Amino acid sequence: MKTFLKGKNTEVIINTEGPVIIIGESINPTRRKRLVTTLQENDFTYVFELAENQIRAGADVLDVNVGFPGVDDVRLLPDVVVAIGEKFDIPLCLDSPNPKAIEAALKVSAGKCLINSVNGKEESMTALLPVARDFGAAIIGLCMDDEGITNDPEKRLAIAEKIIERAVRTGLRAEDVIIDPLAMAVSAEPQACIIAAETIRLIHQKLGHNITMGASNISFGLPNREDINSAFMAIAIMNGLTCPIANPEKIAGLVHATDLVLGRDDYAIRFIEHYQSTL
Ligand code: THG
């Protein structure tokens, strides 16, 4: 199955057969105080710096999250989307819990965006699926619903199926629903990686959809996060993860290495190219 996203002129294809597509996570105020202070002053130079560094490191899509306490994201998210669009030609993943901010950003974005995110709650599907259809956007469907987050992979699969079914009924194409199995912190839930990996395997084998996740969630609160993220990333890719939301500056090499050892990079062409372009 293939999901197409678009920048102004570029097209990115997320293919369930690989290779892995990296959605750069760094435009996100979580623990990035400088992003908050610069955005509060309508200064986008730091956003541009984060975008450029991620693209150079191998990001194919950029996640854009400008949520922080007190922000008017219905104004700020579209402003940032326009500003990025003027400088970079790359598809965007609009990351906001506010459907009004998502809609305002879709109105001004040039390409085909990914909406981050819709979940299995009635309220979420009702608010966002018609918007996605009207703007021709793809969506990320989170495996949680009105009953919260379950640790049972089969139940997470059922929520994924529900979101896909409702999206198709609303008028989206099935391939425009990318599923997020939910990766939780392994420091809080020892089975978090196993539950996510099994959910990925079930979604890949039974539904055949593209799969994303916030890969670095897994290592919250622990030292040496990079090694934990890497260990989990390889397992998740093997099971069917196709477009992680991650920091390409830290994970792109591991991602390309995983594609290579999974036999999805003939003659190591992409792997070698990565080092030619980043060194
Ligand atoms: N699923 C979906 N969307 C998501 C998430 C998810 N969006 C947000 C988040 N989870 C993924 N994005 C991030 C962004 C930054 C960090 C983690 C996840 C992060 N930042 C560093 C920190 O907290 O220490 C700071 C910067 C750095 O060193 O890179 O970890 O699960 N659909």
Image (cartoon, rainbow, N blue to C red):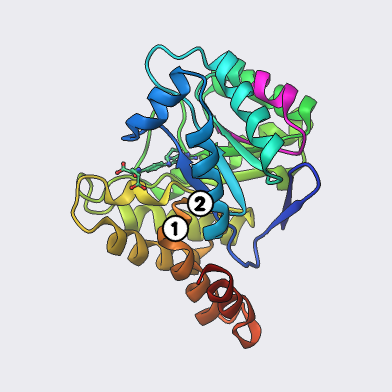
Q: Give the extent of the magenta segment.
A: 103-117
Q: Mark 1 is on which residue type?
A: Glu
Q: Which mark is residue 21?
A: none
Q: Mark 1 CB in 8 Å range of ligand 1? A: yes
Q: Is residue 147 visible?
A: no
Residue 140: horizontal and vertical position, in percent? 58, 39
Outermost bottom residue: 267
Please state which amino acid type lies under the numbered disc 2: Asn
In the image, taking residue 62 as reference, residue 169 lies left or right, namely right
Rendered residue at 66%/24% (across/down): 105
Q: Are marks 1 and 2 in contact (CB under 8 Å)?
A: yes
Q: Which mark is residue 249?
A: 1
Work out whether 53 lies above or below 259: above
Tag 2 residue: 53
**Helix, strand or loop for disc 1:** helix
- Which quadrant: the N terminus? bottom right
